[in-house]
Image (cartoon, rainbow, N blue to C red):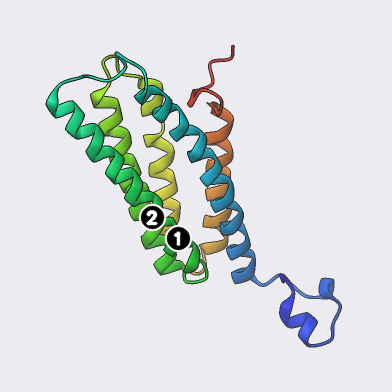
Amino acid sequence: MLYHTDKEAGKDWFSGPIQQVVFCNLMLAIFLIFFRGKIMHDDATFYSDLSKEGIFKSGRLSRFLIKFGLLLGYISWLLWAPAIYFLDDHTVFSAFLITSLVLSTFWLIIDLLTRTVPEWRRAFWVIPNVFYIGFLVLLLLPAWAPRAAIALLAVLIFDWLISDPLSGHLATGR
């Protein structure tokens, strides 16, 4: 796949350079798979907390905000399908994924504001989201696209390493 034109020309796959667009798309596909897994673990903690008494404020406004945050989360998940479909069109791909991340970030902020005791460790996720969005914008520049795809993976690795996928919080070293 990375050496498609060389293979069609009858050359050995490893005798030519890697096609940058294909390399970039492969890095983005890997990013999407692992990023979705990380988000799944992070979201599992939220859903677990929803079933517990006393974690979230019980007022009418808080309950409305929690439901509104869930709606934002569902919409953000729906945007992944067209993002994946348009993986090879970096403009459309970035637009869908940036919108998804913005909605997820608003959901995160609502989550933080509606808890009885704010969990500031969860607020950390706003920082990687800003970097993800920044590198998705950089992906729009063809000369920078491969670097942006690699940077997305690097931020994901950093995000995953400092998060505890079992608790959905920052790793505390325990």
For disc 2, the marked residue is 78
User: Residue at the location (38% across, 60% down)?
Assistant: 96
Residue 168 lies, in percent from the top left, at 48, 27
Which type of secondary structure does the marked residue at label 2 adopt?
Answer: helix
Residue 114 lies, in percent from the top left, at 24, 24
- In the image, residue 67 sits, relative to residue 174, either above or below, namely below
Identify the amino acid type marked 1.
Answer: Ala
**Is the Cβ of the residue at disc 1 closer than 8 Å to that at disc 2?**
yes
Give the class, few, some or many, for how many residues have Cα within 10 Å of label 2's Cα (few <14, many ≥20).
few
Q: Which residue lies furthest to the left in this view?
A: 60
Q: How many labels does the image show?
A: 2
Which type of secondary structure does the marked residue at label 1 adopt?
Answer: helix
> From the viewer's perspective, is 156 left or right of 79?
right
The image quarter containing residue 37 is top right
Q: Which residue lies furthest to the bottom in this view?
A: 9
User: Residue at the location (51% across, 22% down)?
Assistant: 167
The one nearer the camera, 111 or 2, is 111
Instruction: Work out how far the residue at label 1 is from the one at label 2, CA to CA, in angstroms.
Output: 6 Å
Identify the amino acid type marked 2.
Answer: Leu
> From the viewer's perspective, is 94 left or right of 53?
right
The image quarter containing residue 165 is top right
The one nearer the camera, 110 or 171, is 110
Q: Which residue lies furthest to the right in this view?
A: 12
For disc 1, the marked residue is 81
Give the class, few, some or many, for how many residues have Cα within 10 Å of label 1's Cα (few <14, many ≥20).
some
Q: Quadrant of the N terminus?
A: bottom right
Residue 29 lies, in percent from the top left, at 58, 58
> From the viewer's perspective, is 157 left or right of 119?
right
- In the image, residue 128 sits, relative to residue 134, either above or below, namely above
User: Residue at the location (54% across, 52% down)?
Assistant: 32
